[in-house]
Amino acid sequence: MTDHDEEAGSPACLMHLIDPVSGRAPPDGDRQQWIDVMRWRKAERERLIALRLAIPAEERRRCSESIAEGLDRVLGHLAGRTVSVYWPFRGEPDLRPWMERLSERGATCALPVVIAPRTPLAFRAWRRGEPLKPGVWNIPAPAEGPDIEPDIVLAPVVGFDRACYRLGHGGGFFDRTLAILSPRPRIVGVGYARLSIPTIFPQAHDIPMDLIVTEEGIVRI
């Protein structure tokens, strides 16, 4: 599951004035800067998503395999751990083969679930063959089951910088969720190396990843 430019039920014309985590407009003194950053982010998201979608399918598959190998190196032994992965959307690295093998390694695979606009994500366990239902934007999510707490969260990125800040799709779901998880899980961004940018111009609500895994290696703070 990813963040998205416009949350369900949110008027698109007002989104550039709204903090995606708090749901409030910024103070008057900060408003112009906020508007400038939000406009830049919207344009940069569109550019980076187009770049991602332009990657040929076979190249995306090879990149996804390299990213999975990088996750194995950096995460190590996973038995007894709960790992939240994601269902790929709009050209994101496809880690489904990797996540389907988690149970064989003694780990629990979880998928994020959008409960409602401007609310944190829930996480539910899932194994291959168990039912999924279309969630927000028709992204599959576990059809049933209790909420669980992940030890590791894999967060797909639209873009990222060398300080490990993540540019998502703009809905604020991951930032809002990571801000309240206690204890804090290990947070690992996942994306293509070509999506690196000098800075995302981080704001108060942005939460850096612990590291980011790309097909070319590991980015750490």
Image (cartoon, rainbow, N blue to C red):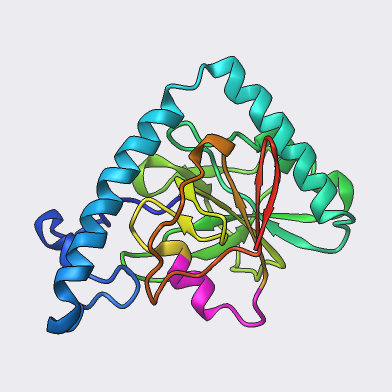
- Residue 1 visible in the snapshot: no
How far from the left and from the top, in percent, is residue 27? 18, 84
Residue found at x 18% / y 61%: 16
Nearest the eye: 4 or 189: 189
Residue 129: quarter of image:
top right
Q: How many labels does the image show?
A: 0
Residue found at x 12% / y 82%: 28
Position of residue 48 relative to residue 151, above or below, is above
How far from the left and from the top, in percent, is residue 207? 50, 70
Nearest the eye: 130 or 151: 151
- Residue 96 visible in the snapshot: yes
How far from the left and from the top, in percent, is residue 181? 58, 77
Magenta region: which residues? 175-184
Q: Is residue 72 left or right of residue 10?
A: right
Taking the magenta stretch, the answer to whether it contains residue 206 is no
Q: Which secondary structure class fits the magenta region best?
A: helix
How far from the left and from the top, in percent, is residue 2? 45, 50
